[in-house]
Amino acid sequence: MQCLSDLGAACCGRLAKLGGAGGHRRRLLEMGFVPGTRFRVVRRVDIGGVLELELRGCRVTLRTTEARDILVEDVFE
């Protein structure tokens, strides 16, 4: 398993485990970051530290600091 924040653009995989605490973790779950969900990294912007992801038919943007709390598996390009 690896952190979502370590992935580059065009990587796909499956969410394995959600970290974080309290409200932050709950907000990620509300946005669809549920273990077992497939995702694709659409774009990575290192200057602002932002990841754009596609999961469950929607595009979501996360800061890389938020993405560090998400572990992924079955990653491929």
Image (spheres, grey):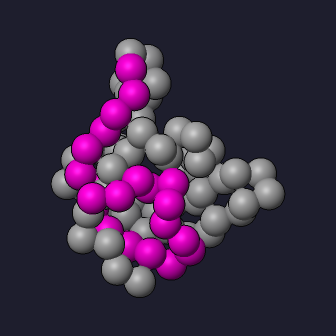
Give the quarter of the image for residue 63: top right
Name the residue at the left extreme.
36
- The x and y percentages for residue 58 are 46, 57
Residue at image point 44% right, 17% down: 23
Residue at image point 38% right, 73% down: 12
Q: Is residue 57 magenta?
A: no
Foreground of the two, 46 or 24 = 46
Left or right: residue 9 compared with residue 70: right
Q: Is residue 8 magenta?
A: yes
Give the quarter of the image for residue 57: bottom left
Name the residue at the right extreme.
47
Name the residue at the bottom extreme.
77
Residue at image point 51% right, 54% down: 5
Residue at image point 80% right, 57% down: 47
- The x and y percentages for residue 74 are 24, 70
Q: Is residue 56 visible?
A: no
Which residue range is magenta in the image? 1-21
- The x and y percentages for residue 24 are 46, 24
- The x and y percentages for residue 14 are 27, 62
